[in-house]
Image (tube, grey):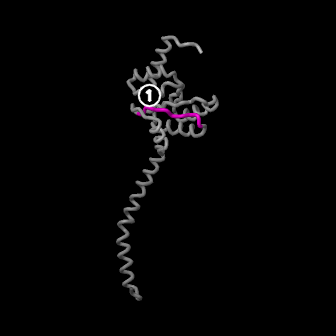
Amino acid sequence: MSKLTKAQKQETVATLASRLQSARAIVFALYRGLTVRELTDVRNSLRSQGIEFTVVKTSLLKRALEQDKLPTPADDVLSQPIAMVVSDTDEITPAKLLAQAAKANGKLAMLAGIMNGTLVDAGELSFLASLPGREELLGRLVGTLSNLPRRLVWSLNFPVASFANVVKQFQSPQGV
C-alpha cells in the first residue's frame, strides 16, 4: 500500500471531521480476524439501517476527533486497527447491530464509542445494545396508554357492580 501524502492526510482528516460532526453515535470496533465475506456481511447489515462502517487509520481519526473537539478514546483503543461505525439518526442501533454481529461470528468486538459527544466504554455499549429498540419501546408505551382508560372504567364500575350484586342478593327470595 502506498503512503499518503500530507495533502491526502489533511483531506482525509477534514472528511472524517465533517463526518463525525454530524454523527449522533460513533462506535469503534475491533475487526481483526474477520474474513472479507464476514466484514462485507457486517457492512451490509449496517448499511441497510443507514449506518456507515469504515475502516480508519487511527492516527488520522485521532486528529479528526481533536479537530471536532470530541472526546478521544484511550490509547489502548486507538493502538490497534479499528473500524468506525457512524449513525446520524440513532444512538442504540449501531451498538445493537454490532453486538448481534459479534455474537454471530465471535471475532468482532466493540471497544468504545461516542454518543452525543460523550465517551462511552465497551461495557456501556453492551448495556445499550441489550436495551429494547425504539420501536419496541414506543409499542409498549402505546399498549400501556391504551390500557389506562379500560382500567379506569373497570375501577369506577367495580364498586357500583359490587353494590348492585349485594342488593340483588338481598332481594332474591332465598336471601343471604
Q: Nearer the viewer, residue 164 or 72?
A: 72
> In the rendering, at what x and y percent does residue 146 appear?
42, 55
Q: Quadrant of residue 144?
A: bottom left
Count of picture labels: 1
Q: Residue at x 45, y 51 (%)?
A: 140
Residue at 52 percent across and 25 percent down: it is 80
Mark 1 surroundings within 10 Å by alpha-carbon count, few (fewer than 14), some (14 through 19), many (20 or more): few
Decide if residue 167 is on the left or right side of residue 138: left
Quarter of the image for residue 121 reads top left
Q: Which residue is mark 1?
A: 74
Q: Amino acid at mark 1?
A: Ala
Q: What percent of the width, then of the height, locates residue 57?
A: 51, 21
Relative vertical location of residue 35 with respect to residue 133 in this rendering, above or below: above
Residue 43 position within the rendered picture, expressed as x and y whole percent measured from the top left: 57, 31
Residue 148 or residue 14, whichever sits in front? 14
Residue 47 belongs to the span the image colors magenta: no
Task: Please give the name of the residue rendered at 36% of the width and 84% of the height, measured from the top-left corner.
Answer: 170
Query: What stretch of residues is rendered in magenta?
Result: 106-115
Q: Residue furthest front?
A: 76
Q: Main secondary structure of the magenta part?
A: strand
Query: In percent of the image, x 47 and y 15: which residue is there?
Result: 11
Please state if 107 lies on the left or on the right of 116 as rendered: right
* On-image quarter of the C terminus: bottom left
Where is residue 10 drawn, in percent x and y? 46, 14
Magenta-drawn stretch contains 110: yes
